[in-house]
Image (tube, rainbow, N blue to C red):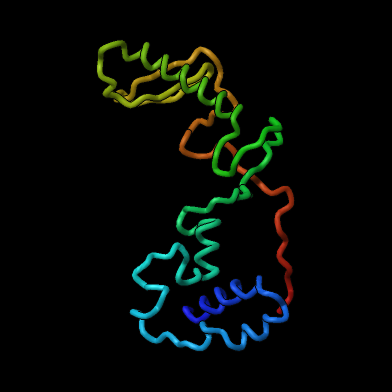
Amino acid sequence: SIQRFDALIENLIFRFIEPQLGLVAASSSPLQNRLIDTAENNWLNPSILWNTPRRRRPVEVRQTRRFGMKEWGTYKLPVLNKKIRVDHSTGEYYELGKLAPNTYKRIMEETKLIQKKMADTFGTGKPKDQDVVVLYKGEEKKVPETYRIVEMEHERPAFFSQNLLQKNRDIQPDNPTVKPSGLV
């Protein structure tokens, strides 16, 4: 690499000499005639810190620095979200596994009403040490003595199922799959 640098310097020096003398000067160049084998005699002393990279970085390293990596969580480019769907009943967008914003607001309003009714039922300053059963207007349910009943003045909303741990709807196929017979 030092010999290449010497050739580069030599090229720059002789570039500005007369074109007729260029061939003569190039053939009898003092820099070409002497070979520098030892670092002590070299005019490019290696003890000097040159502000140039010594080795080129591989393509993978350069691309990783430039764009980041998804696996490491440092990806710098925008990622396309393929989980966005449309709620056809309200016409709003939502992400799979999450509720649509307006549906979420309706559920939160109903939840706040239930929480307010629970606070009225238990009273202030007393521990809420019993399980709660929420009964809406028009509902009757046999409840054990250990449960506290919270009665709501309005009917149960359609989106609020009886058992909040299971889904409200059962999807039945309109035409069940017919299996072929007599194939043996």
**What percent of the width, then of the height, locates residue 37?**
39, 87
**What percent of the width, then of the height, locates residue 80?**
63, 49
Figure check: 85 above or below 108: below
* Of residues 177 and 25, the one drawn nearer to the viewer in this rendering: 25
- Tell me which residue sits at (54%, 14%) in the image: 154
- Tell me which residue sits at (56%, 18%) in the image: 155
Image quadrant holding the C terminus, namely bottom right
* Of residues 106 and 52, the one drawn nearer to the viewer in this rendering: 52
Number of marks in the rendered image: 0
Could you tell whether 96 is left or right of 145 in the image? Answer: right
**What percent of the width, then of the height, locates residue 54?**
45, 71
**What percent of the width, then of the height, locates residue 129?**
26, 23
- Tell me which residue sits at (47%, 17%) in the image: 113
Q: Quadrant of residue 14?
A: bottom right
Figure check: 64 above or below 34: above
* Of residues 172 and 31, the one drawn nearer to the viewer in this rendering: 31
- Tell me which residue sits at (40%, 78%) in the image: 42
Q: Quadrant of residue 148?
A: top left
Figure check: 83 above or below 122: below
